[in-house]
Amino acid sequence: MRYSIIVPVYNRPDEVNELLESLTRQEEKDFEVVIVEDGSKTPCQKVCDQYAGRLDLHYFMKPNSGPGQSRNYGAERAKGDYLLILDSDVVLPEGYLTAISKELDREPADAFGGPDCAHSSFTPTQKAISYSMTSFFTTGGIRGGKKKLDKFYPRSFNMGVRREAYQQLGGFSKMRFGEDIDFSIRIFQAGLRCRLFPEAWVWHKRRTDLKKFFKQVHNSGIARINLYKKYPESLKIVHLLPAVFTLGVLFLLLGAPVCVWSLSLLLLFALIICIDSTLQNNSLKIGMLSIVASFIQLTGYGTGFLRAWWKRCVLKKDEFAAFEKNFYK
């Protein structure tokens, strides 16, 4: 068997149904699906049972431990030569596995990953959040699958690893957040071959509301400092930008009573975001929502980063995470 698709799940039966339905339409059929229910209160077993005759599907229930350890649990029981790690909130185009096979046949890789995008059926809020996570103006394009990057670090929503490489690395660490970046860093440290597969993309729903989105990116900011403490060389200038943006916004808001023109910089940024997102999505509504999502993405990550920097680098405290019950992004 060539592929084992491993999906950790926590209270997401509807999402699992959409993912499994998209898997039934894959052009390539040489794969199994391993669903790992991570202590859900709303399990997806009944949903999985509906696909028993349509997919080579294996369902496991285990106590809650977070997505990283659940992926390891699934990997131990998988049979494929390559382990494909997916989040439960993705949907696959019909040619997803075909695109992976073409890339592997062209040039072998120990690990790989693909980009994500918003589906036409996604809500305006989901599309705005997707824009804020992939736009050059918010993340520098590091989440959008750009080929120009010197190294591509696969993320766990769409990641593939050769079985022997996964075993060599010992799977995912016990980090509560940032465990996928930790895994990707160890891929390069081990001298393994890692590539971007630009055509192996997925539709990624991300969060469905802005409050949950803030929690997600805030923890991502915390995770970046936790990763820095573990791998100092992993911190790049681009990772500092949300913190700089957050401090800049605070400075400009505090200066507004003295010089109202200080707000013009924030208005200019908002205008750029609105125009760019409106053109990309052909919707002014999504463009307006993208302003809110982009500010949340940058300030949420920035405040998490600054909070963790203060606690871990200044006060010398141990690793921590906020919103710890929110394992799943």
Image (cartoon, helix red, strand yellow):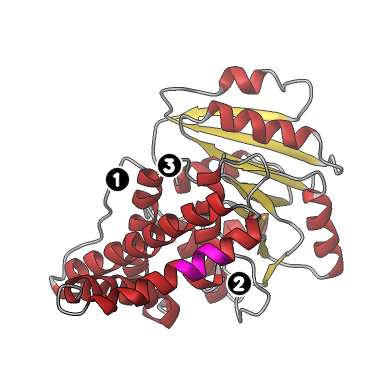
How many numbered circles are shown? 3
The label on residue 152 is 2
Relative placement, left or right, of 268 versus 97 is left
Q: CA distance from mark 2 to mark 3?
A: 28 Å
Disc nearer the start of the sequence (2/1): 2
Q: Position of residue 82 (x, y in %)?
A: 71, 52
Report whether 91 appears left or right of 230.
Answer: right
**Residue under pointer 3:** 209
- Whichever of labels 3 and 1 marks the residue nearer the N terminus, that label is 3
- Disc 3 + disc 1, Cβ < 8 Å: no
Residue 15 in the image, given as x and y percentages of width and height: 58, 33
Q: Relative to residue 287, is residue 239 depicted above or below?
A: below
Asked which secondary structure carries label 2, the reply is: loop
* Mark identifier at residue 324: 1
**Start and end of the magenta stretch?**
271-275
**Mark 2 closeness class: few <14, some 14–19, many ≥20 residues within 10 Å:** many
> At 61% from the left edge and 79% from the top edge, which residue is drawn?
149
Q: Is residue 1 a member of the stretch shown in magenta? A: no
Q: Position of residue 20 (x, y in %)?
A: 69, 32
Q: Amino acid at mark 2?
A: Phe
> Of the residues shown, which amino acid type is indicated by label 1?
Glu
Quadrant in which the N terminus appears: top right
Give the Cα separation between the discs numbered 3 and 1.
18 Å
Nearer the observer, 50 or 267:
267
